[in-house]
Amino acid sequence: MGTPSVTVTVTTSERRLLEPLARAKTAPQRLVERCRIVLLSAEGWTNETQADELGIDRQCVRRWRHRWARARPALDAAEQREASAKDLEKLIIGILTDDDRCGARRLHDIGPLIVPPGQHALTFQSSDAPSISDGEIKSRARRRVSIAVGTWNWSVRGEQH
């Protein structure tokens, strides 16, 4: 068996959040797998043993072990400022997602946006000036959208939100 490449530590509060995520039936499978990698790494499992146990590539285990270790300062800072369980869970999920990977799909929360099925036009208008882009997104339209950071008002069929 190999030796662990990087030491992974998990605090009690992190473990309380990681364990349910690692068993979740409705969470994205990638997140579940990555939670298991972190937990097994913290228990001292080698990359090779984890890869065999989880049925994944050893490099995948190595990647997430390293990513968790690099995030340790942010996790420690959150614990020191006594972040809520919800904030700590957001941080953990952020660490275990692909958002900072080059070429990863970027999703931006504009919600809550609840729109019934059917044809709709969403219109975004900046409530801050200046803006980079004001525009309309029609259903099934495929176009690149650039939006400036700031506060945005949106409407569906004239209803302001």
Image (spheres, rainbow, N blue to C red):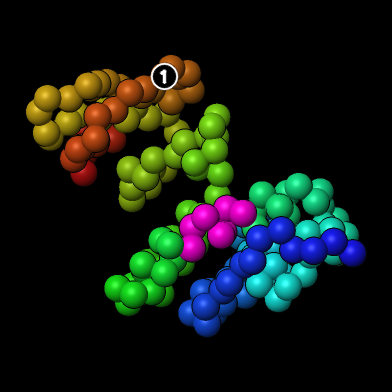
- Relative height, residue 154 to residue 73 (above, below): above
| Depth check, front residue: 47 or 128 | 47
Q: Residue at x 41, y 19 (%)?
A: 144
Question: Disc 1 marks which residue?
Answer: 144
The secondary structure type at the circle numbered 1 is loop
Residue 24 visible to the viewer: no
- The number of discs equals 1
Q: Position of residue 30 (x, y in %)?
A: 66, 53
Q: Position of residue 70 (x, y in %)?
A: 52, 55
Image quadrant where residue 157 sits: top left
- Relative height, residue 155 to residue 65 (above, below): above
Image quadrant where residue 150 sits: top left
Question: Magenta residues: mostly which secondary structure?
Answer: helix
- Relative height, residue 20 to residue 146 (above, below): below
Residue 140 visible to the viewer: yes
Q: Position of residue 137 (x, y in %)?
A: 36, 24
Judged left or right of residue 133, residue 75 is right
Q: Quadrant of the C terminus?
A: top left
| Depth check, front residue: 138 or 11 | 11
State which region is magenta: 66-72
For label 1, count other residues whose C-alpha is less than 10 Å away and answer few (under 14), some (14-19) or many (20+).
Answer: few
Furthest toward the bottom, the residue is 12
The amino acid on which the numbered mark 1 sits, given as a three-letter code, is Arg
Judged left or right of residue 145, residue 106 is right
Q: Residue at x 48, y 54 (%)?
A: 94
